[in-house]
Amino acid sequence: MTKQGRQGMFISFEGGDGAGKSTQIHELTEYLRQMGYEVVLTREPGGTPISEAVRGILLDPQNKAMDAVTETLLYAAARAQLVAEVIRPAVNAGRIVICDRFLDSSIAYQAFGRDLGDMVGEINRYGVGDCMPDLTIYLRVDPKAGKARIQGRAADRIESEPDAFHQKVFEGYEEICRRDPARVCAVDAGRGIEEIAEEIRAEVMKRIHEI
Ligand code: TYD
């Protein structure tokens, strides 16, 4: 860990669209930096020049013809580059990496939302390997409430999907929580910003001290 000179830590943030991830990521990053930790902040899809180029293709509302398997492969490709170029080196150098979305997004959106099932984990095995988050903060918000929160801003290709898709994504996240309770910490995102931020800080500091 940065302060004690030990190995770093990898934290991902997850949640449906409109869960308030950006705000909470900002809060946690500022807090950890003030505590003296070296934090590398990144996002998916994106975070490297190659991955950001892939992001452009993935989120372009014009790309209506995109096949679900193509979509999965592109998210996995963007992720493989991010792991190799940013996440793995930073964690090995003792930093705290905070990533806005990671593999769980593909499980929720592609395996559940697109009904692709186990194929999604298989495809991602090549690029992710053992580089999984030590802690995942899942901001749980009812899909309808999430939709209401993002109303008014231009929707990307995924956000434009119908309610039934977002409901399946929600159920996907719930299943991920059940499968991996040691890694995934579900946080009720329907509360005030500061209350949520405090819960996240406490969870992160607990894990930092455990390392
Ligand atoms: P982004 O603007 O980063 O959304 P958010 O602010 O909600 O994180 O866009 C990312 C979109 O891509 C989001 O709708 C979720 C989707 N997504 C997938 O479908 N699969 C994935 O593997 C990832 C990383 C994101």
Image: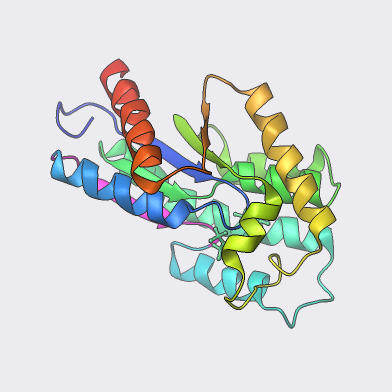
Task: Please give left or right for residue 143 compared with residue 51 in the image.
Answer: right
Of 26 and 151, the residue lying toward us: 151
Please say whether residue 3 is visible from this viewpoint: yes
The magenta stretch spans which residues? 36-45
Q: Quadrant of residue 138?
A: top right
Q: Position of residue 145 (x, y in %)?
A: 64, 53
Q: Is residue 69 left or right of residue 140?
A: right
Residue at the front extreme of this rendering: 192
Q: Quadrant of the C terminus?
A: top left
Q: Nearer the viewer, residue 125 or 183?
A: 183
Q: Name the spot of residue 36 as percent of width and height, x first.
A: 13, 40
Q: In the rendered structure, does residue 68 fall within the stretch colored magenta?
A: no
Residue 121 seen? no
The x and y percentages for residue 176 are: 67, 31
Residue drawn 38% across and 46% down? Answer: 98
Residue 188, how many percent across, how many down?
Answer: 53, 36
Image quadrant of residue 198? top left
Q: Is residue 4 above or below residue 136?
A: above
Q: Tell me: 137 left or right of 23.
A: right
Q: Residue at x 78, y 48 (%)?
A: 167
Q: Vertical placement of 52 versus 4: above or below?
A: below
Q: In which quadrant of this rendering is ligand 1 seen?
A: bottom right
Q: Quadrant of the N terminus?
A: top left
